[in-house]
Amino acid sequence: MTRWLSEDEQRAWRAFVSLQAKLNAQLNRELQAESDLSLADFEVLVHLTDRDDARARSFELASEMEWEKSRLSHHLARMQRRGLIDRVGCPEDARGSYIELTAEGRHAIEHATPGHVSTVRRLIFDQLTPEQVQALRTISETVLAQLD
């Protein structure tokens, strides 16, 4: 038997779905306007800059970003054409390669990050009390733990 959402749950769910769509669209618009990076470009670059050697295997990025392999492959090809990343041989697997951050990619994310952080702060955290920030974190971590 289906456990239907209560009226409050339905309003919360619809607000969350709308928030997610509008927030991602706004973050993407502002990031592209300020830095010529899409939100997807930024996410790839963040994953690479989080690593000591600024490189990763495609399957690692796909797993971390929860993207389909083909989507990531197409996106990485576009980023490579723009000089943001490069593919370099993998000594451990002759058929594989590493996705490596280029100097241009590093410059792009270093240029984009301050504006992106300001946008995130303005759109989200400036509206919230410290208690709401903690509640957002707790809710997010609770749902993520169940999804994992």
Image (spheres, rainbow, N blue to C red):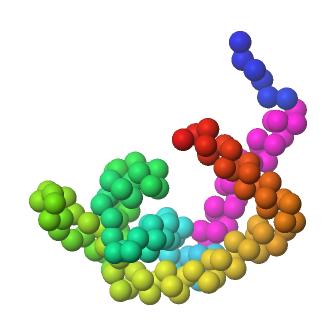
Q: Please indicate whether residue 105 sits to the left or right of residue 145 in the image.
A: left
| Looking at the image, residue 60 lies above or below residue 55 | above
Extreme residue toward the front, this view: 52
The front one of 14 and 139 is 139
Residue reaching furthest top? 1
Q: Residue 134, position in %: x, y?
A: 79, 58
Q: Is 83 left, or right, of 18 in this rendering?
A: left
Question: Is 28 or 96 nearer to us in this picture?
Answer: 96
Task: Give the answer, above or below, for where 54 lies relative to 62.
Answer: below
Q: Residue at x 69, y 76 (%)?
A: 119
Looking at the image, residue 39 lies above or below residue 2: below
Is 62 part of what is drawn in magenta? no
Residues rendered magenta in the picture: 7-29
Report which quarter residue 142 is drawn in.
top right
Q: From the image, which quarter does the N terminus lie in?
A: top right
Residue 131 locus on image (x, y percent): 86, 60
Which image quadrant is residue 55 in? bottom left
- Residue 129 screen position, x and y as percent: 87, 66
